[in-house]
Image (tube, helix red, strand yellow):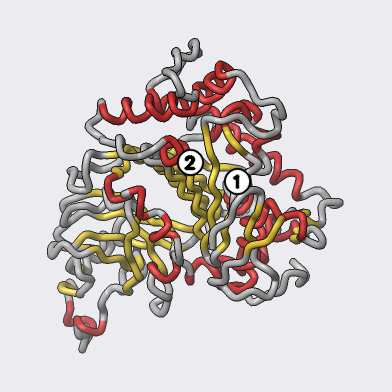
């Protein structure tokens, strides 16, 4: 179901997962209240770890991490550890990262060239398909059959340049979980993107605070005022499907908040400051002369095509609207996928050791000339927030998270008050309620 203009879609409190509902924000009878304790309560965080995280599809790594036989990647989320492995038969598999003898983890970090999965504690070993093949001093165990001790499998699948895992053996297929998203994004050719770097940033905030910041455009007029000169933040249609949702934003035009519009130079300056690298411009400069009939938006699109062409990527078949329309997908519970023809960014948040801690994970991609381009392992780094530079906009998003978390602890702050514009934040909570088996107004410990 498409939406236009200022319409937004949101899930009603009794809507089934998978339902697509569209309504006009102004028609909403009242704000949606969400208990603030969902962001601060240790009991609520424990309930998420018990009932939600082991049952959802979530991003573990990228195909570039595990492109070749013997490649492996350890994915950690709270207490859970999943080992993603490319088998010697070329198949992608995932296992719970635990030795079935005494519980030691089998691998940490990531690497290449594995021929087996061997525990470093007592040297039990499995092949890359998860079959037990060696037990030292076997006689001491009596009757011990290899077939009775395979590694515990984890569901694994891919969509475009992302590897997803699900600890629930009975989970619905990933394609069904993602609902309309793969078809909606098919135009973008996501298989042509290669992951260059993954940056993990510890933040003093609940994982939902981080996710919420990438689930609405309402905050642009507050936190990202430098963007207003080159984004339509008001006529930004939203769609909610169930586990997934979407927003679109058009760039290269001023916000309708400027009732008389803006001069081309101000539109150009705003785009250069916030996304100039897309067109190879990183310093303020005069807007170049426009050709007859050309708008500044057309010029920005042309410059982006030229920048990509210099890297062997042909985007000449895409018009200005396609080049400068951002498609922002939210994948429950914790991932946002930002898509334009030349740019792919994946932003994820994982729970930390307490409800007041999270890991913000940013995946940076570049576009290759074709889906057959070779793959190389991304650079994986963990940086404190004060050392990480993700660009002007994302830096602001991370900087505000800690203040939000402190505010949520204040005794008077019993509930978040959400508008129809924040329908994707509401949808996160509706899905949480379903997985946790609670109601919208149930008491939070």
Determine the secondary structure under disc 1. loop
- Residue 135 in which image quadrant: bottom left
Mark 1 neighbour class, 10 Å CA radius: few under 14, some 14 to 19, many 20 or more: many
Judging depth in this view, the residue of 23 and 121 nearest the camera is: 23
Can residue 435 be seen here?
A: yes
Measured as percent of width and height from the top left, residue 44 is found at: 66, 65
Query: Which disc number belongs to residue 236?
Result: 1
* Residue that label 2 marks: 325
Judging depth in this view, the residue of 191 and 80 nearest the camera is: 191
Query: Which disc number belongs to residue 57?
Result: none
Measured as percent of width and height from the top left, residue 387 is found at: 50, 28
Horizontal side, residue 432 vs residue 97: left or right:
right
Measured as percent of width and height from the top left, residue 365 is found at: 35, 40
Going from the N terminus, do you reach mark 2 or mark 1 first? 1
How far apart marks 2 and 1 lie (CA) works out to 10 Å
Judging depth in this view, the residue of 15 and 412 nearest the camera is: 15
Measured as percent of width and height from the top left, residue 90 is found at: 16, 62
Q: In which quadrant will I find the N terminus? A: bottom right
Mark 2 neighbour class, 10 Å CA radius: few under 14, some 14 to 19, many 20 or more: some
Residue sitting at 30 percent across and 36 percent down? 315
């Amino acid at each position: 179901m498409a939406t236009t203009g200022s319409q937004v879609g949101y899930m009603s409190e009794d809507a089934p997962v998978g339902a697509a509902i569209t309504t006009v924000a102004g028609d909403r009878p009242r704000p949606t209240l969400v208990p603030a304790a969902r962001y601060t309560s240790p009991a609520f965080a424990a309930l998420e770890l018990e009932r939600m995280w082991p049952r959802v599809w979530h991003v573990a790594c990228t195909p570039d991490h595990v492109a070749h036989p013997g490649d492996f990647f350890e994915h950690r989320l709270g207490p859970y550890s999943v080992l993603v492995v490319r088998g010697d038969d070329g198949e992608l598999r995932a296992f719970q990262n635990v030795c079935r003898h005494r519980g030691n983890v089998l691998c940490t970090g990531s690497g290449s060239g594995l021929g087996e999965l061997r525990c470093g504690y007592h040297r039990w070993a499995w092949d890359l398909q998860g079959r037990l093949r060696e037990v030292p001093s076997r006689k001491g165990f009596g009757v011990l059959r290899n077939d009775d001790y395979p590694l515990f499998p984890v569901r694994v699948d891919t969509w475009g340049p992302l590897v997803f895992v699900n600890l629930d053996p009975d989970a619905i297929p990933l394609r069904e979980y993602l609902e309309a998203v793969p078809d909606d994004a098919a135009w973008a050719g996501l298989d042509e993107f290669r992951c260059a770097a993954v940056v993990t940033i510890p933040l003093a905030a609940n994982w939902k605070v981080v996710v919420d910041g990438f689930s609405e455009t309402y905050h642009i007029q507050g936190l990202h005022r430098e963007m207003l000169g080159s984004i339509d933040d008001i006529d930004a249609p939203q769609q909610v499907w169930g586990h997934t949702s979407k927003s679109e934003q058009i760039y290269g035009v001023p916000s309708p908040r400027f009732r008389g519009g803006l001069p081309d130079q101000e539109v150009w300056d705003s785009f250069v400051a916030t996304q100039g690298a897309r067109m190879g411009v990183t310093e303020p400069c005069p807007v170049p002369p426009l050709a007859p009939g050309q708008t500044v938006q057309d010029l920005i699109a042309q410059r982006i095509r030229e920048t990509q062409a210099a890297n062997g990527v042909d985007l000449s078949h895409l018009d200005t609207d396609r080049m400068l329309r951002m498609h922002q997908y939210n994948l429950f519970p914790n991932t946002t996928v930002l898509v334009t023809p030349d740019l792919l960014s994946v932003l994820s948040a994982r729970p930390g050791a307490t409800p007041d801690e999270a890991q913000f994970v940013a995946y940076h991609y570049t576009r290759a000339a074709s889906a057959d381009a070779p793959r190389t392992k991304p650079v994986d780094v963990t940086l404190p927030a004060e050392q990480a530079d993700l660009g002007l906009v994302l830096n602001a998003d991370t900087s505000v998270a800690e203040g939000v978390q402190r505010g949520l602890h204040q005794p008077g702050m019993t509930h978040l008050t959400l508008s129809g514009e924040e329908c994707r934040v509401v949808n996160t909570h509706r899905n949480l309620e379903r997985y946790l088996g609670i109601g919208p107004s149930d008491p939070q410990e």
